[in-house]
Image (cartoon, helix red, strand yellow):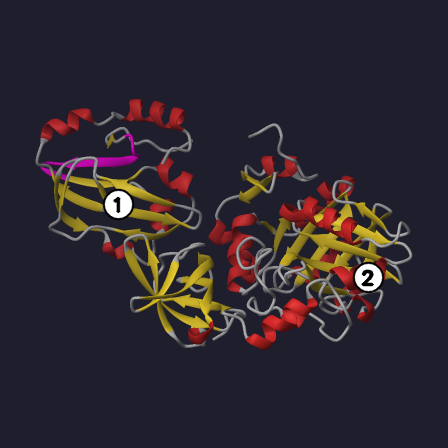
């Protein structure tokens, strides 16, 4: 069973969002990393780039597949997890911790209400199966 | 899973291990159990086992079997001792490759041939079409047998222990021996597709599960097709449908070591001789990438703005920590050390051409 922490918000493209005041940390879910298998490469945006909700902001590649990353929120990238570019397996082993991907400033708090709560994401990801 | 997919005798064992299953050439096969990278590393450092029962196993026997295989395949089967196997190609009239195979000679006029799952029906039909005599019989043994590859530096010792026979360790590469399990014959061939030492076992379908379980109990890691692919790319081995197909010649694929031009006539020999004398327009090369992003089949290879080739296979190397690949490169640029770029989506990935051989060796 994939882990779905209760204190996070989720997108239907299998990103998670952790809010800390005005800062949102974003990564991919345990379900997403399990579907992809061994993650070997991350393409993350430059710090300072403005992300539009639902637009592609990077990609995550595993031995078997490439998956686009979609911004769950509109906002400016203020930090990226460049420290794991050579240890991308951390996205597999610790997707909600050391395997986080980017931090953005939340510019439209209404968008938060469109994201899924943990229970709803859990149901969604079970039904979605191999969707990522 | 589709109901129509074929299942190997080890199918239930894969499900028990919670393998991720995929359709491979019409077979429901394990692509990985836990991690493609960890499975590959197990083979490089210890011992891994692969269910390769999906590969076709056919017997060509009877008066005229040697003549049929001399005509249908590129290598010289007459040079084989009765304990020996060889890598070979089934070639077509254009000098292209119908399949790459391993031929085991059993006696004067009997051969076991291991063929690719994706080509099994095509190969059998092709061999029938070249058959000159009704005395030659082609028997498909694929469904009544299973095949398990045991690979890695610790593999030979584990196999010897399983069969309780240390003399198995004396088997040279590309030779085979017969042994027994439960009173049933087993063929153990010192071959593999990983670049490591090891054996490929051909066993009765009904014995496969017990042998698989014994090897797991001996500490072997179950390995899926994902790690098998990564390992063979690191080792510089071609895969049908990637590096070779009906339109590629053994000259450009650098497989002339598996072609005997001296043995006499065989299908496509004159065309291969012509390609060799003119020089192939492109050659298969190895490639070592600087980054982790993976070149995949069909991606274009550039020098500056000039497209000079196309990727046939690529993978993140579990051993090296960056990607490796194979590619057909325009012959005038196909030299080791040439710096190239691979177009990967909206990016260019830097890489260096290498000879098509084991990419793990410096």
Residue beneath the point at 59% across and 71% down: B275
Dots 2, 1 in contact, CB < 8 A: no
Residue beneath the point at 67% across and 40% down: B10
Residue A13 belongs to magenta span: yes
Residue B323 in the figure: left or right of residue B17: left
- When asked about the image quadrant of residue A16, the answer is top left
Residue B8 in the figure: left or right of residue B24: right
Image coords of residue A4 (percent x, y): 32, 31
Screen quadrant of the N terminus of chain A? top left
Residue B6 belongs to magenta span: no
- Residue under pointer 2: B105
Mark drawn on residue A100: 1
Whether residue B317 is visible here, answered yes or no, is no
Q: Residues within 10 Å of mark 1 (few under 14, many from 20)?
A: many
In this view, the residue in front, B299 or A78, is B299
Image coords of residue A124 (percent x, y): 34, 24
Report how far apart the C-alphas of labels 2 and 1 lie in the structure: 56 Å
> Is A53 drawn above or below residue B358 in the view shown?
above
- Helix or strand or loop: what does disc 2 sit on? strand
Marked residue chain, label 1 = A
Same chain for mark 2 and mark 1? The answer is: no
2 vs 1, front mark: 2
- When asked about the image quadrant of residue B160, the answer is bottom right
- When asked about the image quadrant of residue B334, the answer is bottom left
Residue beneath the point at 31% across and 26% down: A121
For the record, the magenta segment spans A12-23
Image coords of residue B186 (percent x, y): 80, 52
> Is B6 drawn above or below residue B201 in the view shown?
above
């Amino acid at each position: 069973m994939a882990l779905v922490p209760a204190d996070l918000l989720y997108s239907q493209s299998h990103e998670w969002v952790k809010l800390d005041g005005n800062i949102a940390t974003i990564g991919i879910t345990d379900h997403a990393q399990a579907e992809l298998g061994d993650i070997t490469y991350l393409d993350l945006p430059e710090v300072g780039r403005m992300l539009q909700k639902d637009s592609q902001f990077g990609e995550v590649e595993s031995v078997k597949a490439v998956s686009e990353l979609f911004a769950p929120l509109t906002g400016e990238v203020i930090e990226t997890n460049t420290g794991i570019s050579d240890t991308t397996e951390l996205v597999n082993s610790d997707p909600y911790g050391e395997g986080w991907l980017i931090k953005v400033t939340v510019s439209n708090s209404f968008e938060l209400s469109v994201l899924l709560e943990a229970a709803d994401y859990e149901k969604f990801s079970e039904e979605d199966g191999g969707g990522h | 899973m589709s109901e129509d997919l074929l299942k190997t005798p080890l199918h239930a064992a894969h499900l028990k291990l919670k393998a991720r299953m995929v359709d491979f050439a019409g077979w429901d096969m394990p692509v990985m159990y836990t991690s493609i990278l960890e499975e590959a590393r197990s083979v490089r450092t210890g011992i891994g086992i692969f269910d390769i029962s999906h590969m076709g196993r056919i017997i060509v026997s009877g008066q005229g079997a040697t003549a049929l295989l001399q005509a249908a395949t590129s290598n010289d089967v007459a040079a084989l001792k009765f304990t020996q196997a060889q890598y070979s190609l089934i070639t077509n009239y254009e000098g292209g490759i119908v399949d790459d195979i391993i031929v085991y000679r059993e006696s004067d006029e009997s051969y076991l041939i291991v063929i690719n799952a994706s080509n099994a029906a095509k190969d059998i039909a092709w061999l029938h079409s070249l058959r000159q005599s009704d005395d030659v019989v082609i028997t498909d043994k694929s469904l009544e047998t299973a095949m398990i590859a045991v690979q890695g530096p610790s593999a030979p010792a584990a196999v010897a222990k399983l069969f309780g026979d240390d003399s198995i360790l004396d088997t040279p590469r590309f030779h085979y021996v017969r042994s027994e399990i439960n009173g049933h014959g087993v063929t153990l061939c010192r071959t593999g597709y990983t670049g490591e030492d090891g054996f490929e076992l051909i066993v009765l379908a009904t014995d496969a599960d017990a042998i698989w379980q014994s090897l797991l109990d001996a500490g072997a890691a179950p390995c899926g097709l994902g790690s098998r692919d990564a390992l063979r790319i690191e080792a510089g081995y071609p895969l049908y449908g990637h590096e070779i197909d009906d339109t590629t010649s053994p000259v450009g694929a650098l497989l002339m070591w598996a072609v005997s031009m001296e043995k006499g006539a065989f299908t496509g020999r004159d065309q291969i001789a012509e390609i060799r004398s003119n020089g192939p327009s492109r050659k298969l090369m190895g490639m070592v990438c600087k980054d982790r992003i993976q070149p995949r089949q069909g991606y274009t290879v550039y020098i500056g703005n000039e497209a000079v080739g196309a990727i046939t296979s690529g993978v993140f190397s579990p051993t090296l920590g960056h990607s490796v690949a194979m590619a057909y490169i325009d012959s005038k640029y196909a030299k080791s050390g040439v710096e190239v770029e691979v177009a990967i989506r909206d990016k260019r990935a830097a890489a260096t051409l290498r000879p098509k051989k084991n990419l793990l060796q410096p």
